[in-house]
Amino acid sequence: MKFTYIFGPVYSGRLGHSLGLDLLGERICSMDCLYCEVGRTNELTLTRKPYVPAEKLLDELRHWRDEHSDNLPDYVTLGGSGEPCLNSDLDTIIKGCKQILPSVPVAVLTNSTLLCDPEVQEALMEVDAVLPSLDSLVDKEFAKLNRPCGGVKAAHVAECLVKFSDTYNGKIFLEILLSQGVNDSQENLTLLKEYVTSLQPHRVDVTTLSRPGAFSLAKAVDPAVRKVWQTALSECITRFDANGSANQQHATQENAPPAAATQSATGNFADLPEQDRSAAKQRVLESLTRRPQTPSQLAIALTLPLSNVQESLNILENEGAIYKSEQDRTATLNTDEPFYSCQ
């Protein structure tokens, strides 16, 4: 069966092999971030609707389970092409995931803008992990980088996340994405250190652009800058270790596979059995419909040997199904590899 709203599993440094569920179907979001790797937001909104009805999504998940019952993922991750909490069927979808794949934990990616909505809070209480993002606590930086719906302010989003964490029993993995010259200021770092100290998430991940963003203004920070931020913010966490256990060594992104592993792409993952050529080609194409990626990123995400990925890319490029991104769009992404896209 060809799936419309299910993708992967793909490899994630935070969640392992993650099966993605797209709750939007289109680029619908409460933000229009400069760095968004799926492209510019088509519908900027805070209105909750059943953008992808629970019945459709869960029906696909049942079919996926029946086809892959011997190879279940580490997580089912609710995300997609925008903000998944905008889907008003969120509660039904979460409960359905747990019924269909009862042994697989459920995670939700969110930009945190809807965490003060009581219905969203209630739904998220049932998931095993929430991965909220909060890139800046400086108003002008937040507005410039995240371009949210009117009325959404950084301080309010941050407050909502704290209130949610007070009653939530699952894991919180906070993500902060840095864009050069936009939110990498000392002021933001100081505010976020205070905030992380108060929030005490299970871990904090400082990232930067690794793929072309929606707008050319978004540029990756230097790896040394990211490392300084990662260390400073990780040191603010005193309650949890990398596995979420209390009162141990604090969690850091350094526990995840290093960026170098993603760049080389082979590592241990390429030791998996080689996939059928046509199946590999289809998986590569489906992954590129969601975001631009390098050969190495595809190899790690899809757990395919790099040679198989490159072969699939060559075929798809010759067929005109994909293209390489222009070099000026990727020059600041800390990689010499080309990015492929079919968007």
Image (tube, helix red, strand yellow):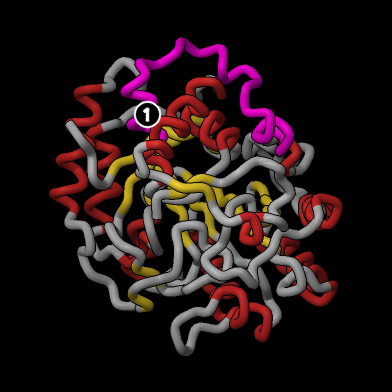
Foreground residue, 251 or 41?
A: 41
Q: Which residue is mark 1?
A: 281
> For residue 129: magenta?
no
Foreground residue, 64 or 117?
A: 64
Query: Could you say where residue 259 lies in the image, as x and y percent from the top left?
Result: 71, 38
Foreground residue, 139 or 314?
A: 314
Tell whether 246 sits left or right of 153.
right
Quadrant where the N terminus sits is top left
Residue at image location 56% in from the left, 35% down from the top: 295
Main SS of residues in magenta: helix
Query: Could you say where residue 190 lies in the image, as x and y percent from the top left?
Result: 82, 71
Instruction: Give, as a three-letter code, the residue at label 1.
Output: Lys
Q: Is residue 338 above or below residue 88?
A: above
How packed is label 1: few (under 14 Cα within 10 Å), some, or many (20 or more)? many
Tell whether 209 sits left or right of 106.
right
Residue at image location 43% in from the left, 39% down from the top: 317
Q: Which residues are magenta?
A: 258-284
Foreground residue, 4 or 85?
A: 4
Q: Is residue 127 above or below residue 283?
A: below
Residue at image location 38% in from the left, 77% down from the top: 44
Tell whether 210 sits left or right of 187.
left
